[in-house]
Image (tube, helix red, strand yellow):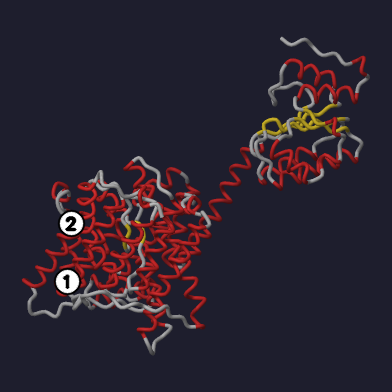
Amino acid sequence: MQLTNQINFRNVRGDLFGGVTAAVIALPMALAFGVASGAGAVSGLWGAVLVGFFAALFGGTPTLISEPTGPMTVVMTAVIANLIAANPADPQQGLAMAFTVVMLAGVFQIIFGALRLGKYVTMMPYTVISGFMSGIGIILVILQLAPFLGQASPAGGVVGTLRSLPELFANVQPAETALALATVAIIWFMPRRYRRVVPPQLVALIVGTALSLILFPGLDIRRIGEIPTGFPALQVPTFRAEQLSLMLVDAAVLGMLGCIDALLTSMVADSLTRTEHNSNKELIGQGLGNIASGLFGGIAGAGATMGTVVNIQAGGRTALSGLTRAGVLLIVILAGANLAATIPLAVLAGIALKVGIDIVDWGFLKRAHKVSLKGALIMYGVIALTVLVDLIAAVGIGVFVANILTIERMSLIQEKSVKTITDADDAVLLNPNEKALLDQANGRVLLFSLSGPMLFGVAKAIAREHNAISACDAIVFDFNEVPHLGVTVSLAIENAIREAVEKGRKVFLVGATGQTKKRLESLGVFELIPPQYAYSTREDALKSALSAVTPEENVVIAPAV
C-alpha cells in the first residue's frame, strides 16, 4: 500500500487538530449507534476505532473519517435482531454470527474494490439515492421512538414499532422522554458560534447525563451501564448452515450500503479539498476496516459525512488525521470507558433520532415534484420500499424503473437522428454536390442517415424507417456520425441490409470505421455487399449509387459553391 501518498508531515498540526476534533464528535455518535444497533455501546466504540484506523491507513480518500453511521446502523440493527431471533436458545451465538456478517461485508467490499467496481457504485440516479437515504433516515427515527419514550424496543423492527405505537405512548416514561427532548433541543438549537468550538452532540451527551443525575436521582432511569475496559476478545467467525444464506445476503446488503455511504462521503471530501479520491482503493480500505471491526466485536462502519467535514474544516488533509482520531478514541476507551456508565439511553436515543432526521433529504423532498413528477414518484416509491419492504428491493426496483424511463427518453431523442431521404431536403445537412446527386437520382437512391450513439432503444426506429422503404434501387447507409453501434441496432441494420440485397437493391456503406466496422464485420455484413461498395465519404457513395442506377453518361455533378 502506498501510504506515502496519504501521510506526510507537512501538515502535522492541521492533521492532529482535525483528528482530535473528529474524535470528539465521534464519541457520542459511536455510543448512540452502538446502543441503537443492539450490540451495545462498546461495540459502537470499537467499530469507530477499528473501521476508522484501517480505512484511514489503507483507504483511497486521505481526509475521510470512517465510523459507524446512521445508514449502517439501520442495517446492523436488522442483522442483529434477525440472527438473535434465529438463535433463541443462544443469543450470544446470534450476536457472534452478526459480527461474522460484518466480516463478510468487509470481504464483499474488498472484492468490489479488487474488481474495480468503485466508479459504478455511485452511478445510481439521484432520485434513487435520495429516496434510499431518506428511507434509512425514517427507519432510524422510527427505531428510536421506543427508547425515546423510555421503553425497550419492541420486536419486529419498523413494522413492529409502528404497530406498538399506541402501547408505547400509553406507557411513556416522562423523565426519560424529557431527557430525550432536551437532547434533541440542544443539538437543534445550539447557536452556530458555539458549534464551532464544541460539537452539539457532545454538549447534549454531557448536559443530558448531568440533568438525569441532578433532577431524577431517585428514578430508575435506563442507562448504558458498565462498559468493559481493555482490549476486546477476538470473535471467531461463526456460521450455521441453516442461516448461511441469510448471513450472505445480509453481508452483501451491508457491504454495498457501506460502499455507497463511503464513496458518497468521499465525493463530499473531494469537493472540499479539490482533490480526487481513489474509489477502488477506498473500498479495499473500508473492507479491511469492517473485517477488523467484526473480528473484535465492533459494528460495521463507513465514511461519515459529519466527521469528514469537521476534520477537513479543522485542518485535516492526510490520513494522519484519521489515524489520530482512532488513537484518541482508543485512549478514551481504555482509560475512561467507565465514565460512560451513567449515560441515559434516552439521551443516546435523542442523538440517534436527530441523526435520522438529518439523513432525510428534506431539500429534495420539498422540490422533487417541481423538478420531475416521474422522478418524484420514483423517490417516494424507493422511500416506501426501503421503510416497509427491503433495502435491496428498494434500490433494485428504483434503479430498474429509473433506467427504463431514461432509456425511453433517450430513445425518443435518438429516434430523431435516424432519417431516410430521397431528395435534397433539410432533414440531413448535405453539401451542394451531395444535393445534386440525390436530385439526379429522382428517388431511386435513398440515403439512410444515422447519427449519435446507436443504443438498443433506437432499433425500433431503424426497423420502422426500413419498413417505410418502398421504391428505390439503391440505399446508402451513412455511419459517419456514429461513435458507437450497439448489438441490437447492429442486428437491425444487418436485417435491413440483408433484406435490401435479397430484393435486388444496391447497398453502399459510408464511414463505417473503428468499433462500428468491427461490429458489422462480426455480423458478416461485408460478406453481403461487394468490398468496393464501402466508402469513406458520403459524396463518393452517392456518386456510385447514382452510377449503379443511372447510365454513366447521365451522371452530372454540380460544381461546388
User: Which of label 1 and label 2 is nearer to you?
Assistant: 1
Secondary structure, mark 2, is helix
- Camera-side residue: 356 or 337? 337
Dot 1 corresponds to which residue?
340
User: Which residue ends up furthest to the bottom in the rendered image?
Assistant: 89
Q: Is residue 247 left or right of residue 448?
A: left
In the rendered view, would you say 175 is above or below 427? below
Instruction: Please tell me how crowded label 2 is: few (under 14), some (14-19), or many (20+) other residues with Cα within 10 Å.
Output: many
Rendered residue at 71%/41% (across/down): 461
Secondary structure, mark 1, is helix
- Upstream in sequence: badge 1 or badge 2: 2
Instruction: Please tell me how crowded label 1 is: few (under 14), some (14-19), or many (20+) other residues with Cα within 10 Å.
Output: many
Q: Quadrant of the N terminus?
A: bottom left
Where is residue 524 shown, x and y percent of the image? Answer: 82, 44
Q: Residue 74 — which label? A: none
Amino acid, disc 2: Pro
Amino acid, disc 1: Ala
Q: CA distance from mark 1 to mark 2?
A: 17 Å
Where is residue 462 shown, x and y percent of the image? Answer: 73, 40
In the rendered view, would you say 456 is above or below 400? above
Where is residue 533 shown, x and y percent of the image? Answer: 84, 31
Rendered residue at 78%/42% (across/down): 521
Which of the 4 image quarters holds residue 214? bottom left
Q: Is residue 136 left or right of residue 548?
A: left
Q: Is residue 69 left or right of residue 24?
A: right
Q: Residue 200 — which label? A: 2
Where is residue 29 shown, x and y percent of the image? Answer: 25, 63
- Camera-side residue: 549 or 41? 41
Rendered residue at 71%/21% (across/down): 430
Q: Is residue 314 left or right of residue 273?
A: left
Rendered residue at 89%/22% (across/down): 547
